[in-house]
Image (tube, rainbow, N blue to C red):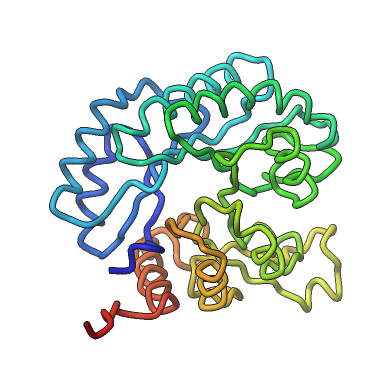
Amino acid sequence: MHDDIRIGTLVNGGASTASYLRQILPHGFESFSITFWQTLGGVDLAKLADEVREVLAGSDAVVSCLSCFGNPLMEDDKAQETRQAWERLIDAARLFDCDLVTGFTGRVVDLPIDQSMDRYAEVWGPLQARAADQGVRIAFENCDMGGDWWRGDWNIAHNPTAWQMMFDRIPSENIGLQWEPCHQMVSLIDPMPQLREWVGKMFNIHGKDCTVLWDVVREHGCDGPHPFAFHRTPGFGDCNWTDIISELRRGGFRGSIDIEGWHDPVYRDDLEMTGQVHGLNYLKQCRGGAFVPNPS
């Protein structure tokens, strides 16, 4: 068993979750990140947990985390729904036999990151305490969602300087990162030094790769109309996932690498699951191949 680092995928939370899991489980996925966008959409989490446990019964697969991706730092109705979704997911995590809830930090829209920090502490301080009381960890995904340091709509947790500010404002062991190398590469950041520095704060990894067209960067830069980077399924991009998994293990990481599909410009539509299963098997090889127990 490779139970230190599992390889899984993201699954949308809702009425079709159990059916979807039942279809893809035979491909060999070892973990599933159940995700929601902004709200839970009226989903009965206790019922969903029962359905998921029934599908996974008899397998070794687990729910790696529950996720809600929205902006909880604003004051509108949707932000309030996102905060309520986080509360419900924290309270329901044990029903899924997991201890991790993930998503965006949120952001005060179109203000610099440092001007979101007071609101970050105001919102996440109580959520962190709620999670800690129940033995639940919180991890923030590092997607910039088209924002930068100076302005944006969704997330402040995409920059290492912001991470340090966040962890300084709420210095808690149960707050960390849901890290993905792709988002760093799109910002032309080498993910490997960052991985070595921050591995102790990485609670979950999104399995998404990136192809950078360096000839386009050299000719046109990264602020013009010419696309210079593409999100890819692992195995089709520029990342060396053998090195990534080695560094995760060297840093003591125990958790899941969950493939974030539905982004690859080539392996998409009818080839979506073809690409994801290729990524699954590729990551298993990067992990070392089939587990071989030591002689007794």
Above or below residue 59? Residue 110 is above
Quadrant containing the C terminus in the rendered view: bottom left
Above or below residue 288? Residue 82 is above
Residue 193, quarter of the rendered image: bottom right
Task: Judge from the rendering whether residue 128 lies leftward or rightward of residue 149; answer left or right.
Answer: left
Task: Pick out the residue farthest to the left.
Answer: 58
Task: Judge from the rendering whether residue 66 lies leftward or rightward of residue 263; answer left or right.
Answer: left
Quadrant containing the N terminus in the rendered view: bottom left
Q: Position of residue 222 (x, y in %)?
A: 82, 62
Above or below residue 27? Residue 296 is below
Look at 85% across and 35% down and name the residue there.
112
Look at 62% across and 62% down and name the residue there.
182
Task: Judge from the rendering whether residue 107 lies leftward or rightward of residue 200; answer left or right.
Answer: right
Q: So how many labels did they put on this image?
A: 0
Look at 67% across and 35% down and name the residue there.
154
Task: Pick out the residue farthest to the bottom.
Answer: 295
Q: Position of residue 52 (x, y in %)?
A: 23, 40
Q: Position of residue 235 (x, y in %)?
A: 48, 74
Q: Position of residue 157 (x, y in %)?
A: 69, 43
Above or below residue 244? Residue 152 is above
Residue 286, quarter of the rendered image: bottom left
Task: Pick out the residue farthest to the front.
Answer: 296
Task: Judge from the rendering whether residue 240 lies leftward or rightward of residue 225; answer left or right.
Answer: left
